Amino acid sequence: MIEIERVSRAFGGLQAVREVSFTVATGSITGLIGPNGAGKSTLFNIIAGSIPPDSGAIRLQGEDITGLPTHRLFHKGLVRTFQIPHEFSRMTVRENLMLVPAAQRGENLLKSWLSWWKVVREDREILRRADDVLAFLEIDHVRDELAGNLSGGQKKLLDLGRTMMTDARAVLLDEPGAGVNRTLLGKLAEAIERLNRERGYTFCVIEHDMDLIARLCDPVMVMANGELIAEGDMASLRQNPQVREAYLGTGSSGQTGTGT
């Protein structure tokens, strides 16, 4: 689905990412872990189109998307979430979802005047779709709540729901577990698993919660000092001396702090 080939990026004299290559296979939930400063967020931003690489290539289903801006990648089916959710706080949860679909007729003044019946029909379909998403994520009980009043975990579920309002083929999840209580974290993990299993979503996940990574992700990519140092399933990576030294630490429980 996503191919990262020898991608590098420097900021002044700091080499944040150095010739990183790996593939996010179609239908997989691929993890990306590493210590603070490993280059994970920089790589994510490159894949998502927020910053261009200095060298290397990114391909989405064989198409070269290197350096394309975020809004163009959105239309190609590559979307992302953020460590800190970016909801419209003074709009309801349902309204936050209904904003997402692109090129709505109601956004065009002329079409609103001349084809109002089509606008109404489209709005009804978007409303139905938003309610389906809320039911899927089991947050339909807060549909009319202002998004700014949600808990951290509910905001993460809303963020995931917004990806479901697109024609996403691949989703980049940036620390979905950050700031989420254990109960809602389980619900979030279950939603990701169901989207992958039932609807064929492909995910690439940055996360510091090793239990969540172990539950969701196979394979897992490990970065340190801007380089890819290992890949595999979490069971094998926990026993990898290079990974233990760089990230997990000998005798670590596998839980680390936040930050990238």
Image (spheres, grey):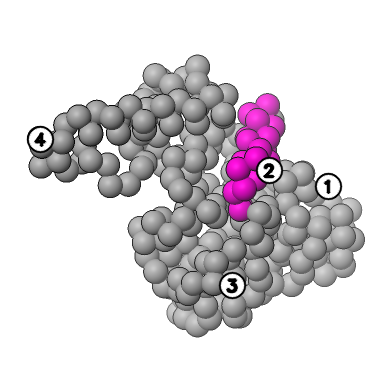
Q: Identify the magenta region.
A: 183-203
Mark on residue 253? 1
Q: Amino acid at mark 2?
A: Arg
Instruction: Left or right? Give the position of 12 relative to 6.
Output: left
Q: Residue at x 53, y 54 (%)?
A: 169
Q: Name the spot of residue 14 as percent of width and height, x first.
A: 53, 77
Mark 4 surroundings: few (<14), some (14-19) or many (≥20) residues within 10 A: few
Mark 2 surroundings: few (<14), some (14-19) or many (≥20) residues within 10 A: few
Task: Tell me if residue 109 can be seen.
Answer: no
Q: Amino acid at mark 1?
A: Ser
Q: Residue at x 33, y 27 (%)?
A: 124
Task: Please state which of the two labelled residues, at mark 1 or mark 4, is closer to the viewer.
Answer: 4
The first of marks 4 and 2 along the sequence is 4
Mark 2, secondary structure of its residue: helix
Task: Please state which of the two labelled residues, at mark 3 or mark 4, is closer to the viewer.
Answer: 4
In the depicted structure, whether residue 214 falls above or below residue 6: above
Q: Amino acid at mark 3?
A: Ile
Which residue bears the numbered disc 4? Answer: 113
Q: For residue 191, what is the image quadrant? A: top right
Instruction: Left or right? Give the position of 207 relative to 15.
Output: right
Task: Please state which of the two labelled residues, at mark 1 or mark 2, is closer to the viewer.
Answer: 2
The first of marks 3 and 1 along the sequence is 3
The first of marks 3 and 4 along the sequence is 3
Instruction: Left or right? Give the position of 41 relative to 181.
Output: left
Pick whichever, 40 or 26, lies toward us.
26
Query: Magenta includes 180?
Result: no
In the depicted structure, whether residue 109 falls above or below residue 132: below
Q: CA distance from mark 3 to mark 4?
A: 46 Å
Task: Please state which of the two labelled residues, at mark 3 or mark 1, is closer to the viewer.
Answer: 3
The first of marks 1 and 4 along the sequence is 4
